[in-house]
Image (tube, rainbow, N blue to C red):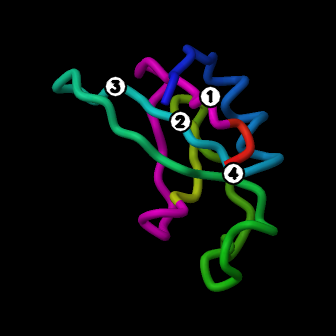
Amino acid sequence: MILTPIEHSELRAELKTRNVQFAFKKKDGTLRTAIGTTNLSNVPEENHPKGIRQSSPMVVPYFDLEKEGWRSVSITKEVFISDNLDF
């Protein structure tokens, strides 16, 4: 897997339209990989948000398709997108 740096704003835009394979550096310096989306057509209905709430501008929220739950990545973390764009 080839990882390319991506801006947080770009990641937000990609997550809105499709499933995205990406990685980010954790506090200990290791990479955490994820496959996520914010496109509700790709999120199980039981995991849809119950209401409308604006997320903090300090994080990029996403639905983790592997862990089957909502997660977020801080905008202070380096983020990389996978070369596998059609995941």
Which residue is nearer to you in this view: 87 or 77?
A: 87
Q: Are marks 2 and 3 in contact (CB under 8 Å)?
A: no
Question: Which residue type does callout 2 highlight?
Answer: Phe
Q: CA distance from mark 1 to mark 4?
A: 13 Å
Q: Quadrant of residue 33?
A: top left
Check the image and report above or below for 68 versus 26: below
First to last magenta residue range:
65-84
Checking the image for residue 25, the label placed there is: 3
Q: Position of residue 77 (x, y in %)?
A: 41, 22
Is residue 79 located in the magenta-colored stretch of the structure?
Answer: yes
Question: Which residue is disc 1 drawn over?
Answer: 83
Question: Which residue is disc 4 drawn over?
Answer: 19
Checking the image for residue 16, the label placed there is: none
Q: Is residue 20 left or right of residue 35?
A: right
SS for dot 2: strand
Q: Tag 1 or tag 2, which sits nearer the N-term?
A: 2
Q: Tag 1 or tag 3, which sits nearer the N-term?
A: 3
- Residue displayed at 49% across by 70% down: 68
Q: Tag 4 or tag 3, which sits nearer the N-term?
A: 4
Q: Position of residue 70 (x, y in %)?
A: 51, 61
SS for dot 4: loop
Q: Nearer the viewer, mark 3 or mark 4?
A: 4
Kindly give the residue lying farthest to the bottom in the view shown. 46
Q: Residues within 10 Å of mark 1 (few under 14, many from 20)?
A: some
Which residue is nearer to you in this view: 16 or 33?
A: 33
- Residue displayed at 46% across by 63% down: 66
Q: Position of residue 61 (x, y in %)?
A: 57, 46
Kindly give the residue lying farthest to the front in the view shown. 1
